[in-house]
Image (spheres, rainbow, N blue to C red):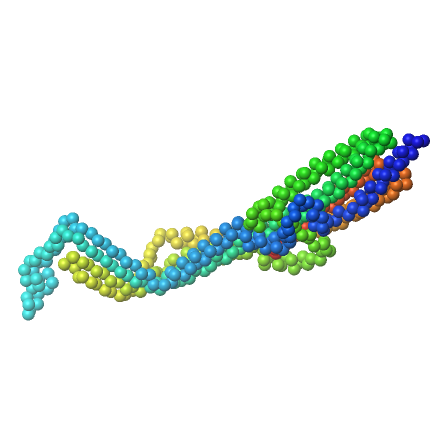
Amino acid sequence: MKVRNHVVATLCTLASLLPVVASAQPSAFAKASADKSALTEANVSVTERLSLENAVRLAVENNTQLQSARLQIDKADADLASARTRRLPLFSTDVTVSQLVTPINFSFPQGAFGTYPSTGPIPSTDTNVSVPRQPTFYMQSQVSQPLTQLVRIGLGIKSAETSRDLEVERVRDRQFSIVNEVKRVYFAILQTQSALVATDEAIELYRELDRTLQVRVAQKVALRGDALDVQFRLAQEELQRVTRRNQLASQKERLNQLLGREIRTEFDVEPADGVSVLDVDLVAARARALENRPDLREARLTLQQAELDRRVTKAGRIPDVSLVLAHTSNLNVDVLPTNIASAGVRLTWEPFDWGRRKHELVTKTATVEQARLAVRDAEDRATLDLNSRFRTLTEKRALLNVAAMAQATSRERLRVKTNQFQLQAALLPDVLQLRAELASSDDRYQQVLLDFWTAKADYDRAVGEE
């Protein structure tokens, strides 16, 4: 009878420690932020508070992959400016400095330039003109203004503009990918911090139980097996804490890398907004997706570029007509004029090409049809992706409700069992079992909540929004 009273006293003492479990409310992400001081006990400096909005802004501004992608836009701008200069007159100069290897002899027979009544034949006798071996200098300068070529040049400029727009859309697509990954890592950090807080609470509880049971075992009023069971659970929770701390450190380093800053930068995340009831107009979202998604814009621009390329090939049939102003200088060659200037029109045309342009046009036309089919395929894939993301989001929202109900049920069962334990109507193993079930429910809720926010980020990207 005396031993039974001691056992009852031990259980009552343990019961006084367990209401902490029943009152624990490991809310998803808000509690992780509120209890961040437990994760930084030795850190007395002020830690940066990083909101999701600021994280996205920093990634858009500083991410190294995005910066590299934006350089492609600068290169496309330079190519566009270069294409526009082709409309302007073309200046060219050709200079030749040479040494005659052999003398040059010119023979002009009598009367080679005509016979005139007043002067007679020119030249009057056979004449030889010789240029000795000496250095010679030839320079030809020319200014050419294209005329009919302006048609192809204009199409080339439009093609360069389309290429620049393509680079812009590729940067947008890369930016959406970076923003989506930032959100995923941010939410993963919140989930890990929340799980770490729950682990710390469990460790404190098991340590109190272990201290109390050690005393009671020494007094021989508690079983040694109960003490070993508590120590085993404590060791498991401590191992879990080490694992989650390492996971949290890796996640923060990854987020710092995405933000384009020193990976060892210390920061703490802010809680995400509460989960609201979804009220999404799928038809309107589909219209926005078809308008805003970078991959669809890129497909349409590729079609536009293919059509311009076909028009350039077709314009190759037009003869090249240019206004030309030329000047030629010949120095140290006595038999040639020193300066010759001319102005006129130059025409270059290939009337027979053996069907080459025809075959090229067939190839370009097929490319246009392929691009048109690619646009249709991209639109279908975008619609399928959006519908799938929307259905996944609604499923995660419903699953979140189930996880919340399971969490609330486990907490209530633990509260009832704790009250029974205080009234000596339940055993310690039963209470510990329910505590383990509550921990599992909490972990499940955190994981489902992370899945919901990840699905929301994927849905935003499918719509073409950040």
The extreme bottom residue here reads: 118
Residue 189, image x and y in percent?
66, 46
The extreme right residue here reads: 1
Residues 230 and 178: in front is 230
Who's the residue at 30% across and 59% down the image? 92
Residues 440 and 244: in front is 244
Who's the residue at 67% across and 38% down the image? 243
State which quarter of the image contains the C terminus: bottom right
Q: How many marks?
A: 0
Residues 307 and 59: in front is 59
Q: Is residue 251 left or right of residue 408?
A: left
Residue 240, image x and y in percent?
70, 38
Q: Is residue 65 visible?
A: yes
Residue 313, image x and y in percent?
41, 56
Q: Is residue 33 left or right of residue 136?
A: right
**Height in image: 401 above or below 437?**
below
Residue 275, image x and y in percent?
72, 53
Residues 8 and 182: in front is 8
State which quarter of the image contains the N terminus: top right
